[in-house]
Each structure stands twice: as structure tokens, then as C-alpha cells.
Amino acid sequence: MGNERRRRGAGEWLATGLAVVGAACALVVVAGVALVAAWLRSQPTAPEVDLDDGALAGPRAAAEERMAQDLDAAVGRVGFAHVVATGRTDRCETGQNNWKIQDEVAVSCRLTLTRVLTFPGEFRPQAGLLADALAGGACETGAHASLREYDERLGQTFRNFPQGYRADDITRAGADCGTEAWVGGIVVEGWITLPAGDPPGQAAGKLPLPCPDVPVDTCRDDDIDLAAALVAAPAGDAYAVVVTDSSEYWTAGWE
């Protein structure tokens, strides 16, 4: 009888203890969720952006006019090349603001203009002249440096280039002397050996990143049919180059 009473008492004590522990855990979870929710509400947020917003129209138009003049003037200095395609990409991107990354701006809008040129002749001398023309003179950096790297690697095989290093493998580089490719300005995105095939495969990767297939309010671009443009290149043209000019034209801070 006594043992039965003791067992019953221990069971009740255990049940009560578990109930207390469960209630305490629930309180901790609720408090934690509340704290996280309060923290999220206190964090700055990025404003919504629409490319049709009138606030973007003026800065974008001014940037596009300046960039088109600079890019077309640079391309115009290349007397032996032919423009076979043009493109335009208008993109706004939202920054990050979390425990790991805190971007200075909440939204950044950038315009990119693209020109695809083809040209005849032997690659290296023509590419050097083209780089000089784009930069407005010879220099030691940017596209010139990438062409010197090509000279050093030409024909060599590497793990990533089992068929040998070719003009198509030259990395993107700023065309302006002293300008890094990631900053903006005129950039040589890449060189292409003709014929590039259909679809052009590796060549297509030298174009600016396209907008998503699903329409969005923050990205619009011209769909360049690179394969068709390269096939339509003048007879005798043996190479192509993708040249872009990009500029950040509008930013917004965190709210």
C-alpha cells in the first residue's frame, strides 16, 4: 500500500515537473520569437523600385546620353571594325542588410550599353590596335594587359584550357587605361573567334547578364541575337569583340 502511494506520488511529481518545464520552454520560445520579430521590425528596409518611376527617368537619360557618346566615340576610333549588334540593359538591384553583410545603399540602378564588333585580319595585331583605339592610346593596364597575358599563354594547355589558350579565353578587362572592369566605364567583355557556331555557346557568356525570363519591374534589356549577328558579319571578318559601357545612375538609402 505504501509502495503504491509512493509510486503514485512520484508519477504525479514527474508529470507536474514536465508540465512546468514544458511551460517554461514555451515561454522561452514565445519570448525568442517576439525578440526576433521586434529586431526585424527595427531593421531598415529597402524602398520598392520601379523602372517606370519618374525619379529615375532624368538621371537615366543623362547617363545614357553621356555613355552613348563615349562608347560610340571609342568604337568610332576603330576604323576597321563593324558594329553588328547593339544592346541596352537597365537593372536595379537591392542590397543586403543582415548580420553578415551591410551594404551602404539599399538600391542601386545601373545602365549598360553593349556593342558587338567584328573585324578582319590576324587577331593579335588587330586586337592591339582595337584596344588602343578604345582606350584612346596605348597603356599598360586593362585590355592591353589581358592581351599581353594572351601572348604568354598562347597555345599552352592548362587544366581549364585542354584545347589550348585561345583568343576566346581572354578575360574581361577595362578598356580605359587605369580603369578596373568591375568599376564600370568602357569594358572589353571578351573576344570571339568566328565562326562561333549556332548557338554561339561560350560566346554568349560574354554578353551582359540577361534579365530573368519572368518580367520584373527592376530589369529590362534588349535581347541580342548573338548567333544571328555573328553570322551576318561582313565577309572576311574573322573575329568579334563585345564592348560595353556601364554606369550607376541612381541609388536609394535604407528606410
Image (cartoon, rainbow, N blue to C red):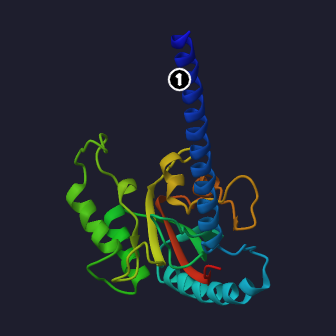
Residue at the (60%, 74%) spot, across then down: 113
Asked if residue 32 shows in the view, the reply is yes
Residue that mark 1 sits on:
10
Q: Is residue 162 left or right of residue 45?
A: left
User: Which kind of residue does numbered mark 1 sit on?
Assistant: Ala
Number of marks: 1
**For the point 48% across and 49% down, which residue is it?**
202
Q: In which quarter of the image is the N terminus?
A: top right
Task: Tell me which corner region of the image, top left, top right, bottom left or bottom right, holds residue 161.
Answer: top left
Locate residue 153, reporting x and y percent.
23, 55
Instruction: Residue 116: give x, y in percent of width and height.
Output: 55, 66
Q: What residue is rendered at 24% in x and 44% in y?
A: 157
**Residue 21 position (above or below residue 219):** above
Residue 87, horizontal then vertical, whole percent: 64, 68
77 up-or-down from 168: above or below: below
Q: Residue at x 30, y 67 (%)?
A: 147
The outermost residue toward the front is 2
Other-residue count near label 1 (Cα within 10 Å), few / some / many at <14 / 14–19 / ≥20 = few
**Which residue sits furthest top?**
1
Instruction: Determine if residue 198 is in view.
Output: no
